[in-house]
Amino acid sequence: MPPGSRQIEMTWRCSSCSHQNLGRHTVCQQCGNPKDASEKYEMPGDTAAAPSVQEPELVRMATAGPNWRCAYCGSNQRKLDDSCAQCGAAPEQPRPKRPEPRKPPPVWWLRLRTWIVRHPYVTGAIGLAIVVLSIYLWVNRTRNFDAQVLAVKWQQDIIVERYMIWDREGWRQDLVASAFEVQSLGQAIHHYEQVLDGYDTQHYTEQVACGEDCRDVPERCTESCSANDNGFATCRTTCTGGGRSCTTRYCTESRTRQVPRYRQEPRYAEKVRYRIWDWGHHRTVPASGTSTDDLRWPIEEAKVGLSLTQGEQERERREGHYFVTLGYDDDERVEVEVAPEAFTGFGVGTSHQLTLQGSNVATDGVPVTRVGDER
């Protein structure tokens, strides 16, 4: 027998006279009836206290293999028996089953399965990427709605720049040749520089290995028994532990290091006040409304080119923003900014095709800029 295993004897109870028989017997020792299929072998209540089988003949019987049942009289026979002890019949040989031919898997599948087994982390990363991609595609799917304009608003600004004399301040080193009436404002801090100012001794602690802590681990053994289907059972002993278990011991050591110290030093330059002919923003004149029918530029209010002195000039730049609030899907709405040439087609109450794809919005097939989030 392999080391760490032993054989013990089981029992069975006769269904005719209730006599309890040892597993070595195939007929009842009280009434002589042969053991049949209804009479099961019973494991000892305390397998650890059950004696080991020692006699060579019993050991040979226990390790021979499971019993066989006579196909003619139904009696229980030993694996070592060549014929039934009750009726003399030979054991019935099982007919081998012809295995059904299996169609081999395709080569590509075998290669893929081998690659997956060899690269588990890559496979997991690919699976996670597929999940993330699926969520992304779902969130960014294209949705089309029949939308209606609920409200509009617009603002058109005329931004006026004037060429005139401006009073400005700056650094003398940055002055241009066209500056005049330059007045010094004295030295001022231009910027700061980081300068090495020595070293500081820094104290710190560090964990270092300084030996081992060991302990004796007791050995623990357990025995499990399984039936041999022949009146005996094989019990195997499994042991864990034993020996010594050691862990690294760490100690705290105090150490020092030199850390550079810096200081911020100001750097000075001469600041000046000066005058200069230049273009600059002079004013912004707005106009706004809440209808597509009252669009206008505030030309009269801007008065570009009027009230100028000698040498002065003015130029204008125009900026417009046009907003539309669309209602869709019963009670949902979205606010978008549309192009100026398309704004007049978005009168309140008009219907349009709205397309949503993630954060992208299009109206009537033309991309627009989302202003407000869906509510």
Image: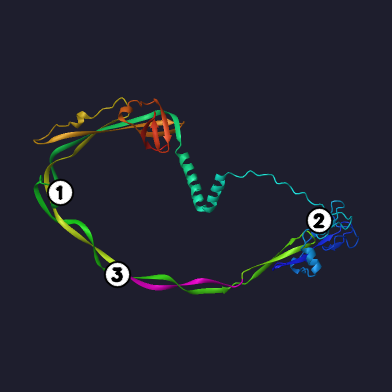
Q: Residue under label 2, please give it.
A: 68
Tell me which residue sits at (80%, 58%) in the image: 67
Q: CA distance from mark 2 to mark 3?
A: 90 Å
Crowding near the residue tagged with mark 2, few <14, some 14–19, many ≥20 C-alpha atoms within 10 Å: some
Q: Amino acid at mark 2?
A: Trp
Query: Is 258 part of what is drawn in magenta?
Result: yes
Where residue 262 sits in the image (x, y, percent)?
26, 64
User: Which mark is in front, 1 or 2?
Assistant: 2
Horizontal side, residue 154 vs residue 3: left or right: left
Tell me which residue sits at (18%, 57%) in the image: 189
Q: Is residue 211 visible?
A: yes
Residue 212 higher or lower than 81, as above or below:
below
Where residue 335 sits in the image (x, y, percent)?
38, 34
Q: Residue under label 1, please give it.
A: 169
Q: Amino acid at mark 1?
A: Glu
Q: Tell me whether circle 1 and circle 2 mark residues in contact (CB < 8 Å).
A: no
Q: CA distance from mark 3 to mark 1?
A: 42 Å
Instruction: Label 3, secondary structure: give it.
Output: strand
Give 331 or 201, whichever is nearer the viewer: 201
Q: How is the image coloured?
A: rainbow
Q: Amino acid at mark 3?
A: Asp
Where residue 330 sits in the image (x, y, percent)?
46, 31
Query: Is 51 part of what is drawn in magenta?
Result: no
Horizontal side, residue 258 vs residue 64: left or right: left
Q: Is residue 44 visible?
A: no
The disc, 3 or 1, on the residue closer to the chain's N-terminal end is 1
The disc, 2 or 3, on the residue closer to the chain's N-terminal end is 2
Please give the label number shown on residue 200.
3
In what quadrant of the picture does the N terminus appear?
A: bottom right
Q: Which residues are magenta?
A: 242-259
Where residue 177 sits in the image (x, y, percent)?
10, 46
Give 186 or 279, whichever is nearer the viewer: 279
